[in-house]
Amino acid sequence: MKVLVIGGGGREHALVWALGRSPRVHTLRCAPGNAGTAAMAENVAISADDVDSLVDHAAAERYDLVVVGPEGPLVAGLADRLQDLHIPVFGPSAAASRMEGSKVFSKEFMARHRIPTAAFKVFRDEAEAREYLLAADTAYPLVVKADGLAAGKGVILADTPEQAAEAASGMLAGRDFGEAGRVVVVEEMLRGIEASFFVLADGDNVVELATCQDYKRALDGDQGLNTGGMGTYSPSAFLDEATRQTIVETVVNPTINGLQAEGCAYRGVLFIGVMLTDEGPKVLEYNCRFGDPETQVLLPRLDGDWFDLLMASATGNLNKVRLSWLDQAAVCVVMAAGGYPGSYGKGEKITGLEKAGAQDGVVVFHAGTSLDENGAVRTSGGRVLGVTALGDDLPDAREKAYAASAAITWSGEQHRTDIAADAAATLERTHES
Ligand code: AMP
Ligand code: GLY
């Protein structure tokens, strides 16, 4: 089988790594890929946002399967265009991708289908938004969100009316996020533990993936700015069987059935960000793609053929595949460029990759890397590497991931030192009680 993966981050390196392990895949390419994918697939120099060129390339090459990593090309209709060409594609249609591409669409969808989520209001007019946000009887804190895609930056947690009004003005006036901010959702701030929940769907059937946890803040102790994710571990210490069941019944099933009933059946992976509140799980957001770095801990734990699963999702055959997971735990520590998530430098030479990758149970996934003219690996993004380790349990996987990351360095490198530390402590308490 001839497979193309679209994207160039850590998630895509993990997808390429897992697809490359399938005996059925004989040709594997990644567009545009990074230094990590170059070592196990052929990189194709087309940007993930260049939908026209991707369609032309896929049509000329007649891939057996195209796997779309990021949300941008999905929201722009890449899956629809490949389907029109009868090229099997893993990833939802533009209509179904609105679950991520438009917060207003997803919030109104949840309201229609009675799916638990934060209470919300939609604003299209700056003066109206400001009047509401500055009114004496509006309760704080609140969350202000740009409707459209904003590269993970369109969510402002506001403690005061002034902060909220300023955020809403910047969005509605088109200053901050362009067209993506011309409509704004204002919602109640939820409290609890946040969890990432993934299901694969094929339009009809749904299968749950293993559970995992993401660490979004830049610094230890959940301090600092929000990032794309500074580390992950799997399985989650917080999503017990009963909670998972509740999420499937109150969120997953009504979502997949609701989309089908509304004429946009969901194919691909649906990533549901959930807040585990005192009143039960509530949806924070939907994403129409895999998480990054969640993928880096899910795929090493898969006990089976990743190509078969993605192909089954693309072709409506998920009822025919069985999914199982290793008993082992996985931890991923993200190593980032100094300054991330603010501005950061590029082009630093990375050392120690081979030594780290040779350690027991370790895979070093590349995110923001490129090869220089001498074949040396250099930094080229904010999140640079995702050092993942499998272990007998979370503390073991955590120790291995940190031991491997200690072998790698470059000028300005930064990472959190507490990934999965709370999980290890939580599990210890659970075992004692
Ligand atoms: P979103 O893109 O909607 O997931 O928002 C990004 C992050 O902002 C989430 O992962 C949460 O950490 C936080 N967030 C979003 N909405 C809320 C909310 N209603 N209450 C509390 N935190 C939120
Ligand atoms: N790690 C969170 C995301 O991929 O959106």
Image: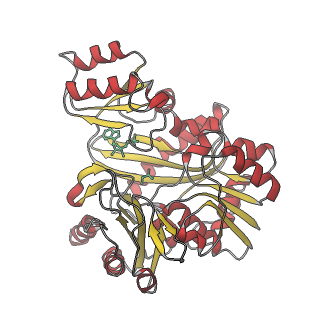
Identify which residue, 387 or 378, lies in the foreground: 378
| Residue at position x 55%, y 59% in the image | 8
Identify which residue, 343 or 229, lies in the foreground: 343
Residue 123 located left or right of residue 20: left
| Residue at position x 34%, y 76% in the image | 409
Q: Which quarter shows the C terminus?
A: bottom left
Q: In this view, does 372 lie above or below 90?
A: below
Identify which residue, 81 or 190, lies in the foreground: 81
Residue 181 located left or right of residue 95: left
Q: Which quarter shows the N terminus?
A: bottom right
Q: In this view, does 38 lie above or below 208?
A: below
Q: In this view, does 146 lie above or below 235?
A: above
Asked whether the viewer can see residue 241, the reply is: yes
State the image coordinates of residue 110 (x, y, percent, origin top left): 48, 32
State the image coordinates of residue 229 (x, y, percent, origin top left): 37, 56
| Residue at position x 68%, y 65% in the image | 29
Residue 139 located left or right of residue 13: left
Identify which residue, 179 or 69, lies in the foreground: 179
| Residue at position x 39%, y 52% in the image | 228
Q: In which quarter of the image is ligand 1?
A: top left
State the image coordinates of residue 106 (x, y, percent, origin top left): 49, 33
